[in-house]
Image: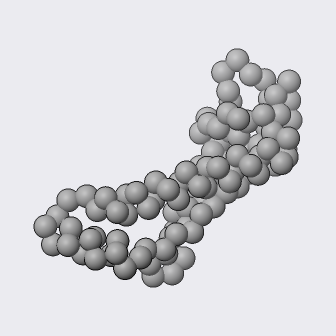
Amino acid sequence: MIITTTETVPGKEIESILGIARGSSVRARNIGRDFMAGLKNIVGGEIEEYTKLQAQSREQALERIQKDAEKMGADAIVSMRMNTSMVMQGAAEILVYGTAVKFK
């Protein structure tokens, strides 16, 4: 499955638009990560625990958008975008969406 942020795929001609494909993941922090992040906040630097948590969320959301597009029979997802929002204190959602397309 080709997933791209561009509107087209070089060398491919879009035959039809199948609809909007989407995938999301909501993750919450945990006490262990919060403790380590608190220590890091005192001394400064990257909070690796949260970086890993966000990376896992992004990968899960990308897997889900791909499955959604596959259900539609898509060959690719074009104009893919990611959005992050806080759902509640300590929990964030990563939403990935794009246009599922079929090639000629």
Please indicate, yes or no, whether residue 78 appears anywhere in the rendered image.
yes
Question: Relative to 77, is 73 on the left or the right?
Answer: right
Quarter containing the N terminus: top right
User: Which residue of the protein is positioned furthest toward the front in this rendering?
Assistant: 32
Say above or below: 35 vs 47. below
Question: Relative to 12, is 92 on the left or the right?
Answer: left
Question: Relative to 50, is 85 on the left or the right?
Answer: right
Which quarter of the figure has residue 13?
Answer: top right
Say above or below: 59 vs 35. above
Residue lying at 15% horizontally and 72% vertically, measured from the top left: 42
Position in image of residue 18 (x %, y %): 84, 44
Say above or below: 45 vs 92. above
Position in image of residue 3 (x %, y %): 64, 38
Which quarter of the figure has residue 6?
Answer: top right
Position in image of residue 103 (x %, y %): 82, 28
Residue lying at 50% horizontally and 56% vertically, measured from the top left: 56
Please indicate, yes or no, whether residue 7 appears anywhere in the rendered image.
no
User: Which residue of the protein is positioned furthest toward the left in this rendering?
Assistant: 43
Question: Relative to 70, is 77 on the left or the right?
Answer: left
Q: How many marks?
A: 0
Residue lying at 76% horizontally and 51% vertically, measured from the top left: 68
Say above or below: 92 vs 80. below
Which quarter of the figure has residue 30?
Answer: bottom left
Q: Who is closer to the viewer here, 20 or 67?
A: 67
Q: Who is closer to the viewer here, 98 or 64?
A: 64
